[in-house]
Every structure is written in structure tokens, then in C-alpha cells.
């Protein structure tokens, strides 16, 4: 039909210009009208190609190549799915459709979207562009749709998404981007400072994403993580990835629990084998198993417990250990504006299970947190460590000083060979504090210059704990030898170097 009209148009133009008649001016309006019909589509036919029911128009499977024209202004739902509309131009609807809230264009082979395709349908809340051939999303393409809540783009060939492609979608709640060729996770959509405030479901499963910003995803509130689907992507296996998925499962987040078997990763090696992420704790990488999400605290510490619910804007309340409701009487426990519970300064009796009850019109959730309080301060271990090091250093210094004293100081004891004062020079020692009285065996001994019968000797070696140690010297003769010698002029070694006083 299209070929016949084009053939007719060419023949008509040739005939008109060939004859150079004035009839060409009569044919031009008809030719332009036919060309416009080819690009704009024919008028809406509610008998053959479409079904019109009040404000709903369904033209599904109508073999359409363009959007019908002359759409009623009161149209609220327009279903154009399963046709052959490959290009959505700016002029697909020349009039404003202010009441249109649902536009369905799935399964059309759509490859082109005009940057002004949605300027006349700004009231859209539901837009279905799934199962088409779109390859990229340009910047600000959806900007006029400030009331859009659901955007379906799954099962296309999208590989490039401009960072500003979803700018202006202030009401967007659900975004489906699964089964495309996306290789970069669009973290800007969910990141704290730049995220879409109302977005609570983002599906990027079944793409080519090989890298996730795990720390940033872990920091997201639970109501966002609950709707963040990233399964069936070629993610490399790691213990950090396992830790995140395991923690999401412990919190019973739908994004993990609904697709547990689909959360797989690629093992290192040339074979690129896939395995379940939650199996990494028992095999392959031997990751540490995640068992609980309890809290640990010390005495005098302040602790904040989060009531991180799977839905946003819920009414929250807390009970303390022993199922005691939180009340203003509890001075050490305070509920924060974000629904969290601040406890402190911690005491040993604050250990136990804290319960957060979250309720809304359609959903209730209960969160349990077990707190263990150590019977020490947070710096106690460090202080004990410092004390241990100080004691050890003191012991080492003491040992070094003893060794210095034993081996490096001069020996002043008479028992040390060659170190004591000369026996014949009894008065050389200025530090002598012991008076030695020598008594001759015969009774009296004559001395020069006086008749004092005793001999005074000062010797450092004879000092015994500050006591006077009189020593009686005796003269003995060696048997078989005519030479005589004194048996003990300075006393025995034991009497000199012992602390035991010698009895006279």
C-alpha cells in the first residue's frame, strides 16, 4: 500500500511538471497530505484498528507503523503495544493530552526517541518502553515527565545512559533497566546526595555490570536496598560481595530473598565458572560466615541503634531489654528524630535485646538488636597494655643496672684479687668505718711510743652491716717449718663477705 502511494506520487509529480500545467498547484496539497499521513499515521479508527472505551484507547496488535492522529483530549490510557512503531517523533501528538497518565509502547521495535517526544504528555505516570530496540538514553530525554512514577525500559539494547537522562523525574518510584547491555551501575540514582528522592525500586539485573560500589551500597538505607535488584550480572566473586549479600539476606531484603539462586558471581580462573554468592563461605574463597548483626559496646560508651526498615516513613517505637517500653523516665535511652535509639553512657545492665516496632498503613516490621556490653572501658585494654609495657621496661632497666654494677664498677671488696687495699697500709682508706682490735697471744704487746696494748686497724673489708667486728689475731707456726706466720690478719673470706656477724 505504501509502495503504491509512493509510485503514484512520483508519477503525479512527473506528469505535472512534464506537462507544465497549472494542475500541479492542485496536486501539491494532496501530495503533502499523503506524506504527512505516512509520517504521522492515519486518523484514529475505533472500529477496525483500535478499541475505544471511554477514556481508554487500545490499539494493541493493530499493525500500526505510526501513532494514530486525532486522539481525544480526554484520553487517559493509550495502549500501542505490539505494533511496528520504530520512531517516536516530536509531532506524534500535535495536541496536548493533559489527562494521559499511561502510555504503553512495548514490543514495537522502537529504536528512536525524539528529545521532544513527551512535551505534550507531561502528566504521564506510567510509561512502558520495554521490549524494544533502544540503544541509548540521551540527557534530559525524560525531563518533561515530572509526575512519572513507573518507567519500564527492560529488554532493550541500552548500553549508554547519560548521567542526566533521568533528571527531572522528581516523582519516579520504580525504574526497570533489566536485560540490557549496561556495564556501569547507575549509582547516582541511589546515592545519598544525588539520588531520586522517591525512587524505591531499581532493577539492573541481567546486564553486563562487573563492578559494584559495595561500600556505598552498604551505606544505603534498608528501604532502598530492599528494592535494589542486581542479580544475574557477571560480578567477580569476592568475600566483600558475599558479606554484603549475606547481610541483606539476614535483614530479609526482597532484592536478595526473592532471587537467592540468581545471585551468582564469576570465580577467578580461565573457565569463568559461576557459583552462588552465598556459597562462598563454605567453599571456593572460604569467606567468614555472616551470622548476626549484633552490637558490641563498652562501659561509659554511647551507642546508636538504627531502626532500618524496609519501607520509608514508618511509625517507630522501641522496647528495652526485658520488653520494657521506652519512656521519658529512662534517662540513658533516647529516641532520635530518625527513629534510631541512642543509649549511653553504657552500663553492664544495658546488655540484652532491643526491639524496634515499625508500622504503617499497609506494612508492619519488627527489628531485633542484641547488645553486649563489655565490663571495661573502651580504653581499658590500651591502658593495660601501657602498664604491661611499663613494667617490662622497668624490669629490663633493672637487669641492665645490675649487670653494670656487677661487671663494670670497680670491686672494692678484699675478696677480689688484687683490688683491696694493702694489708700493710691500714690507714689508707678514707672510708674506713671499722676499728679492728688486735690482741697478741702473750697478753701485752709493746709498741713504740706508748704502752697501749691494742692495735687499731681500719679496714673497709671488715664492715659488717654497720657493726664493729673485733678480730683476735693469733700467731701459729707451721708444722715442720721454723718460719712463723699469722693465721688470719684480715679475717676469713666468709667473715668479710658475709652479712652474719662474727662472735668474739
Image (tube, rainbow, N blue to C red):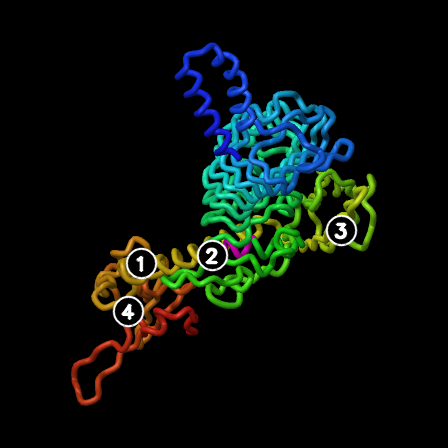
| Part of the protein shown in magenta | 236-244
Q: Cα distance, mark 2 to mark 3?
A: 31 Å
Q: Is residue 49 above or below residue 319?
A: above
Disc with the residue nearer the chain's start (1 vs 2): 2
Query: Can residue 465 be seen in the rendering of this structure?
Result: yes
Secondary structure mainly formed by the magenta segment:
helix
Q: Which residue is found at the position 32% from the left and 64% from the top?
A: 461
Determine contact: label 1, label 4, CB under 8 Å: no
Q: Element under label 2? A: loop
The residue that appears at 66% across and 21% down in the rendered structure is 96
* 48 left or right, relative to 17: right
Residue designated by label 1 = 404
As drawn, is 66 to the left or to the right of 21? Answer: right
Disc 3 marks which residue? Answer: 366
Quick one: label 2 or label 3, which is nearer the N terminus?
2
Question: Is the residue marked by circle 3 packed among few (<14), some (14-19), or many (20+) residues within 10 Å?
Answer: some
Q: Nearer the viewer, mark 2 or mark 4?
A: 2
* Residue at image mark 4: 415
**How far apart are the alpha carbons under marks 1 and 4?**
19 Å
Marks 4/3: CA–CA distance: 86 Å
Amino acid at each position: 500500500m505504501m509502495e503504491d502511494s509512493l509510485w503514484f506520487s512520483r508519477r503525479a509529480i512527473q506528469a505535472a511538471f512534464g506537462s507544465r500545467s497549472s494542475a500541479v498547484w492542485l496536486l501539491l496539497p494532496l501530495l503533502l497530505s499523503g506524506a504527512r499521513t505516512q509520517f504521522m499515521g492515519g486518523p484514529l479508527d475505533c472500529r477496525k484498528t483500535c478499541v475505544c472505551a471511554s477514556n481508554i484507547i487500545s490499539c494493541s496488535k493493530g499493525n500500526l507503523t505510526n501513532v494514530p492522529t486525532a486522539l481525544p483530549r480526554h484520553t487517559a490510557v493509550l495502549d500501542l503495544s505490539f505494533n511496528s512503531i520504530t520512531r517516536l517523533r516530536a509531532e506524534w501528538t500535535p495536541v496536548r493530552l493533559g489527562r494521559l497518565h499511561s502510555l504503553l509502547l512495548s514490543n514495537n521495535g522502537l529504536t528512536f526517541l525524539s528529545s521532544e517526544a513527551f512535551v505534550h504528555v507531561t502528566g504521564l505516570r506510567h510509561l512502558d518502553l520495554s521490549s524494544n530496540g533502544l540503544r541509548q538514553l540521551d540527557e534530559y530525554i525524560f525531563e518533561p515527565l515530572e509526575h512519572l512514577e513507573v518507567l519500564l525500559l527492560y529488554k532493550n539494547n541500552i548500553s549508554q545512559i547519560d548521567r542526566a537522562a533521568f533528571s527531572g523525574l522528581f516523582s519516579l518510584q520504580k525504574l526497570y533497566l533489566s536485560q540490557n547491555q549496561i556495564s556501569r551501575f547507575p549509582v547516582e540514582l541511589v546515592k545519598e546526595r544525588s539520588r531520586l528522592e522517591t525512587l524505591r525500586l531499581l532493577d539492573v539485573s541481567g546486564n553486563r555490570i562487573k563492578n559494584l560500589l559495595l561500600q556505598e551500597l552498604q551505606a544505603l538505607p534498608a528501604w532502598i536496598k530492599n528494592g535494589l535488584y542486581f542479580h544475574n550480572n557477571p560480578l567477580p566473586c569476592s568475600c566483600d560481595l558475599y558479606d554484603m549479600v549475606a547481610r541483606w539476606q539476614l535483614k530479609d531484603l526482597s532484592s536478595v530473598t526473592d532471587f537467592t539462586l540468581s545471585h551468582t558471581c564469576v570465580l577467578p580462573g580461565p573457565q569463568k565458572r559461576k557459583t552462588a554468592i552465598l556459597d562462598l563461605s563454605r567453599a571456593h574463597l572460604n569467606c567468614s560466615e555472616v551470622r548476626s548483626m549484633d552490637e558490641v559496646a563498652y562501659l561509659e560508651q554511647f551507642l546508636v541503634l538504627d531502626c532500618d526498615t524496609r519501607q520509608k516513613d514508618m511509625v517507630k517505637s522501641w522496647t528495652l531489654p526485658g520488653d520494657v517500653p521506652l519512656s521519658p523516665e529512662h534517662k540513658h535511652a533516647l529516641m532520635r528524630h530518625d527513629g534510631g535509639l541512642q543509649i549511653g553512657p553504657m552500663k553492664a545492665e544495658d546488655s540484652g535485646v532491643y526491639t524496634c516496632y515499625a508500622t504503617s498503613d499497609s506494612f508492619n516490621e519488627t527489628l531485633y538488636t542484641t547488645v553486649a556490653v563489655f565490663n571495661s572501658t573502651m580504653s581499658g585494654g590500651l591502658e593495660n597494655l601501657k602498664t604491661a609495657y611499663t613494667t617490662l621496661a622497668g624490669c629490663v632497666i633493672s637487669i641492665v643496672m645490675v649487670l653494670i654494677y656487677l661487671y663494670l664498677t670497680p670491686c672494692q671488696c678484699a675478696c677480689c684479687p688484687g683490688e683491696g687495699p694493702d694489708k700493710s697500709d691500714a690507714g689508707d682508706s678514707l672510708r674506713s668505718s671499722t676499728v679492728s682490735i688486735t690482741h697478741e697471744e702473750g697478753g701485752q704487746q709493746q709498741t713504740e711510743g706508748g704502752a697501749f696494748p691494742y692495735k687499731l686497724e681500719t679496714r673497709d673489708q671488715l664492715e659488717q652491716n654497720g657493726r664493729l667486728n673485733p678480730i683476735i689475731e693469733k700467731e701459729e707456726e707451721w708444722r715442720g717449718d721454723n718460719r712463723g706466720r699469722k693465721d688470719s690478719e684480715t679475717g676469713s673470706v666468709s667473715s668479710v663477705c658475709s652479712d652474719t656477724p662474727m662472735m668474739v
